[in-house]
Amino acid sequence: MKKDIHPSNYRPVVFKDMSNDEIFISRSTVNARETIEIDGVTYPLVKLEITSSSHPFYTGKQTLVDTAGRVDKFRNRYGDRKKK
């Protein structure tokens, strides 16, 4: 491995999802204003509005729009123009 390729502030950081209070620890260079203590170790804390644990795409709670119903409704109202 190459030496000295990471910045000097590359360290473990806690990311907290504010919508469901889930936390995870990852390494990052992000600047943090707050700290949090987990298992006796103090980490920088970064608060996030949404993460993969609360995003509708990853949780499976995404609503799907029925476009086929809209197309059928349009065809019923205006008919098929290719019949001419």
Image (tube, rainbow, N blue to C red):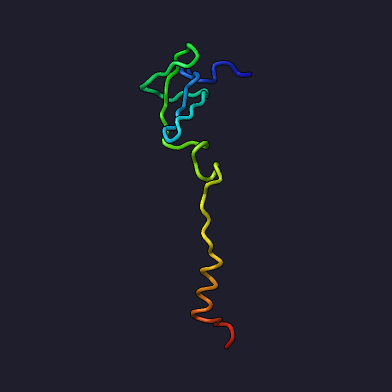
Relative to 83, is 16 on the left or the right? left
The quadrant where residue 59 appears:
top right
Between residue 78 and residue 21, name the one nearer to us.
Answer: 21
**Residue at 50%, 74% in the rendered image:** 74
Count the numbered circles shown: 0
Residue 73 percent coordinates (x, y):
51, 73
Query: Does 57 appear above or below 10?
Result: below
**Looking at this rendering, what residue extends furthest in the left direction?**
33
Relative to 64, is 1 on the left or the right? right
Residue 63 percent coordinates (x, y):
51, 53
Residue 76 percent coordinates (x, y):
53, 78
Residue 72 percent coordinates (x, y):
55, 73
**Residue at 39%, 23% in the rendered image:** 32
**Residue at 54%, 82% in the rendered image:** 81
Query: Does 77 appear above or below 84?
Result: above
**Looking at this rendering, what residue extends furthest in the bottom direction?**
84
Q: Which quadrant: the C terminus? A: bottom right
**Residue at 41%, 36% in the rendered image:** 49
Q: Which quadrant: the N terminus? A: top right
**Looking at this rendering, what residue extends furthest in the top direction?**
40
